[in-house]
């Protein structure tokens, strides 16, 4: 009969010990979670402080890319008097692709939406140049290609796609602040 009071006392100590253990564990876990979250926030802020200038620079380069492939600027920059339309078309397409390749790594720092806009503008510009070139006679001068591209751009129903893309990019940049 002495065993039962001993077991009851042992059970009381076990229950008391487990209660103290779980209460202590609850408070320590809460403290450790708070400390972990603070450290995670500090790391995130440090990473953002490091990547923010890179992201801003990427958006700047993307805006510059849009300006450089805008036909109004592109045609003035690449036009050489006496050049044929076919040669001008090849130079324009090579320049657009080189600009795109030069800025390809910027997709790491801009939003997916911004990068999709960039890809679409590039493809639309290439299509615009090719369509204008195919509408001209084989021996047409480069000035005729320039006129055809600008005329086609002016006949677009919506706003200038380059301006629309810039608005989207600027809205994306404003989300950084």
Image: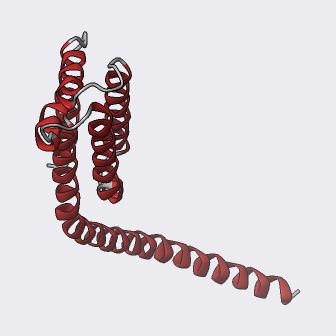
Q: Is residue 123 above or below residue 53?
A: above
Position of residue 80 relative to residue 144, above or below, is: below
Residue 116, percent from left and from top = 38, 38
State left or right for residue 32 relative to residue 4: left
How many numbered callouts? Answer: 0
- Say if 18 sits above or below 34 in the image: below
Where residue 157 sits: x, y (%)? 25, 9
Please provide percent x and percent y for residue 3.
Answer: 85, 88
Classify residue 9 by image quadrant: bottom right
- Provide residue 33's location: percent of width, then percent of height: 40, 69
Query: Residue at image x 25%, y 16%?
Result: 152
Q: What color scheme is it?
A: secondary structure
Quarter location, residue 85: top left
Residue drawn 22% across the image and 28% down it: 141
- Which residue is at 20% across, 61% downward? 52
Name the quadrant of the N terminus: bottom right
Q: Residue furthest right?
A: 1
Decide which of 18, 66 is in the foreground and name it.
66
In the image, 102 versus 30, the foreground residue is: 102
Choose between 65 and 53: the one closer to the eye: 65
């Amino acid at each position: 009969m002495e065993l039962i009071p001993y077991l009851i006392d042992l059970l009381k100590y076990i229950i008391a010990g487990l209660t103290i253990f779980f209460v202590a564990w609850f408070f320590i876990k809460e403290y450790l979670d708070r400390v972990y979250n603070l450290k995670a926030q500090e790391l995130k802020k440090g990473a953002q402080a490091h990547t923010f200038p890179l992201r801003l620079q990427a958006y700047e380069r993307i805006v510059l890319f849009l300006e450089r492939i805008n036909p109004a600027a592109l045609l003035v920059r690449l036009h050489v008097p006496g050049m044929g339309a076919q040669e001008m078309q090849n130079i324009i397409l090579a320049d657009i692709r080189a600009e795109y390749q030069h800025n390809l790594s910027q997709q790491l720092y801009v939003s997916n939406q911004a990068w999709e806009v960039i890809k679409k503008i590039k493809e639309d510009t290439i299509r615009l140049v090719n369509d204008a070139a195919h509408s001209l006679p084989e021996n047409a001068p480069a000035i005729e290609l320039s006129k055809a591209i600008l005329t086609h751009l002016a006949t677009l129903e919506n706003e200038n796609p380059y301006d629309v893309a810039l608005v989207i990019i600027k809205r994306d940049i404003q989300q950084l602040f």
